[in-house]
Image: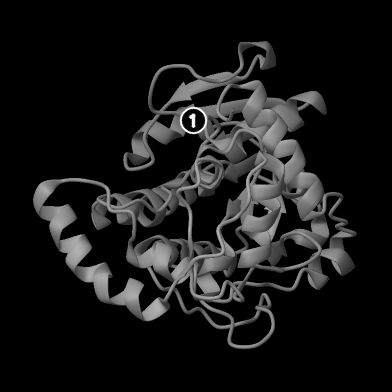
Amino acid sequence: MNILITGATGFIGSNLSKALFEKGHQVRSLIRQSRRIDSELRIKEFKGDLRNKESLVQAVNGTEIVFHIAGVLGEFGIPDQVYLDTHILGTKNLIDVCRENTNLKQFIFCSTIGVYGPCQKESSYEESLYNPTNIYEYTKMEAERLVIEAAKTCFPMTIIRPGLVYGPHSLHILQMFKAVQNKKFFLIGQGKNTLHPVYIDDLIQGFLLVLNNPKAIGEIYNIAGNEAIELRYFFQVIADNVGVKLSKFKIPTWFATSVLYPLIFLAKIFHFQPILTKSRLRFFIDNRACSINKAKRELDYKPKFNFEQGVKLTTQGYRERGYLK
């Protein structure tokens, strides 16, 4: 099949590109800057910008499947307008152009379980209400709403909501591994809150299962590992794999909260990256878990990697690339 991927140079997009190419699909990518995709994959590149509708036409024309993966990860100092333009305007523009493509069979949008916000019960389900807590989650929610609204006029969409994605090429998660290995990491609170990781290969499995699948048209699926885990266990497994003892010292939540806003204030004035932000603090407090029963039931989704296996492979990959000692 002829498939377009936005965000093909990113962590998720590059892994998806490779998987699709290996299955014999004709893969094309939408890029803004110079070539960074593995040249062995023979992926056709189209220069374009999601903020510019006209620049998307050539990349979309003739495609049967569009994977909309492109996004901006949360990071201190990025203006809100960047998230608004990338996630909301960019998605609207891509949908508009895809509507004009008569070959389109499916539009697959990569969202996040973050749109649910903190769990109100044990797990969040696909029908759970939106409750975003930051600009990243809010703009992903609004982008979802655009996709869902388009589906009302027979637009063939599928939405995937991944958990916390990790794997050997993830530079976002790498910083956590480095902090633990360098003994610069301390838990805030008791670390009993939950999160729901998904190893990159399992997420790619989820994408492949919805690809050109009539059952998936018009549907939303959570894709994550078999189990949610406590945050303290998350970091303990990382510590075990990088060969250090996790510090038993824990920063009280009340103390972290009291220094948060003065720290952010100083960071804005003196232009530095603060060690603590609102999103990072919530990472240590909120419960973020989701049910994957729908994906298991309707797609026969079967996560192959437990967290211990995934972290072992991730650590090995980081070491092979010289990212870790």
1, 113: nearer the viewer: 113
- Which residue is farthest top? 40
Q: Is residue 217 visible?
A: yes
* Above or below: residue 120 compared with residue 38: below
Residue bearing mark 1: 30
Q: Quadrant of residue 17?
A: top right
* Above or below: residue 206 compared with residue 24: below
Q: Amino acid at mark 1?
A: Leu
Quarter of the picture containing the C terminus is: top right
23, 73: nearer the viewer: 73
* Above or below: residue 108 compared with residue 58: below
In this rendering, position of residue 193 left or right of residue 83: right
Quarter of the picture containing the N terminus is: top right
Residue at image position (56%, 20%) is 37
83, 58: nearer the viewer: 83
Residue at image position (55%, 58%) is 247
Q: Is residue 204 visible?
A: no
